Image (tube, rainbow, N blue to C red):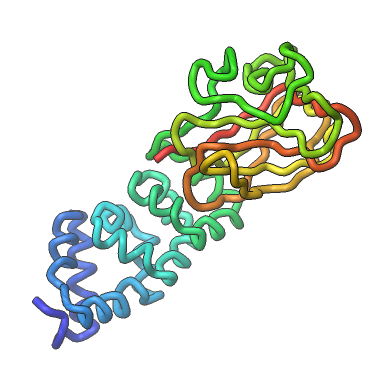
Amino acid sequence: MPITGLSSSTLKTRFFNILAGGNATDLENFLSQFTSAYDKLVLNSEIFSNPAVMDAVVNSPQLATVFNSTTALNMFFASSVAITQLGRSYNGIQTLAQNAQAMRSAIQSQELLNLISRNPSFRQIFTSSTAIPSKSVPTMTSNTTPEGQALGSSIYSSSNDFYKAFDKNSTTLWEPATPNPSEWVGYMFSVPVFVHTLSYTNIENINLCVVQRSSDGTSWEDILTFSPALRLATPVQLPLPLLVNYYKYYRILTVSTSGYPLIRELDFSGFTQ
């Protein structure tokens, strides 16, 4: 059933009728019939890149059907129009957060992550999703147990080892060998993680630092530069910019200090694949 010869209204009617049925398999079968480059171009133009159509879709319960069809999901996230409409829709973000495949696609779309970041309510819905596995640093009892690895630039003494920043014990702390900028402490996850939040407790003598991530522990990418609230005994939850992809290494790098940097507790939390 090629699109050639179908009117725009007929194509849209068939699309919405299938969506109304709520069956992702029916939608997948419908879309898979359009195989030529021309048919795909028309399908994209009339459906997935049509602002009115996408606005109706993202604000309806049938958005879940789109997310549950592999072809429809891929076409949706390939469309800037669809992503823009989704990034404006409360219903759309709620539906996204309930769908594993859509969440994984969102984590690969910087355009959508930017839109989610601009709306605190949308960000809260997104980062609270239970559709895909969440991950944070476990209670570390050594630099390598129970999993992953606490690491850093240096330690002042064995009682200030790297894992002390991740042991969930506010009476212990990480302290480097020098008060100089560029000292750092971080964690290597056992699996790649899309980190969206940094939590810290009782940071001292750090005026400015930067959160960084890496895929190999050698080349680092800046995520956020910030001035930490000092000497707070209650955890500070710091939302990080939502940046695409999953990484294994995350760290805090000191930029400006007023003495030996002290960090009692750190945590990086996010989603795994």
Measured as percent of width and height from the top left, residue 3 is found at: 16, 80
User: Which residue occupies 30% across, 54% down?
Assistant: 67
Measured as percent of width and height from the top left, residue 220 is found at: 62, 46
Front residue of this view, candidates 229 and 185: 185
Q: Quadrant of residue 238?
A: top right
Look at the image and tell me whether residue 75 can be seen. yes
Which quadrant: the N terminus? Answer: bottom left
Q: Quadrant of residue 124?
A: top right
Give the side of residue 110 with respect to residue 143, left or right.
Answer: left
Give the side of residue 145 with respect to residue 61, left or right.
Answer: right
Front residue of this view, candidates 24 and 77: 77
Front residue of this view, candidates 168 and 258: 258
Measured as percent of width and height from the top left, residue 134 is found at: 46, 33
User: Which residue occupies 39% across, 53% down?
Assistant: 105
Which quadrant: the C terminus? Answer: top left
User: Which residue occupies 22% across, 82% down?
Assistant: 38
Q: How many marks?
A: 0
Measured as percent of width and height from the top left, residue 131 is found at: 38, 39
Q: Quadrant of residue 188?
A: top right
Look at the image and tell me whether residue 95 can be seen. no
**Residue situated furthest right in the rendering:** 258
User: Which residue occupies 77% across, 39% down?
Assistant: 182
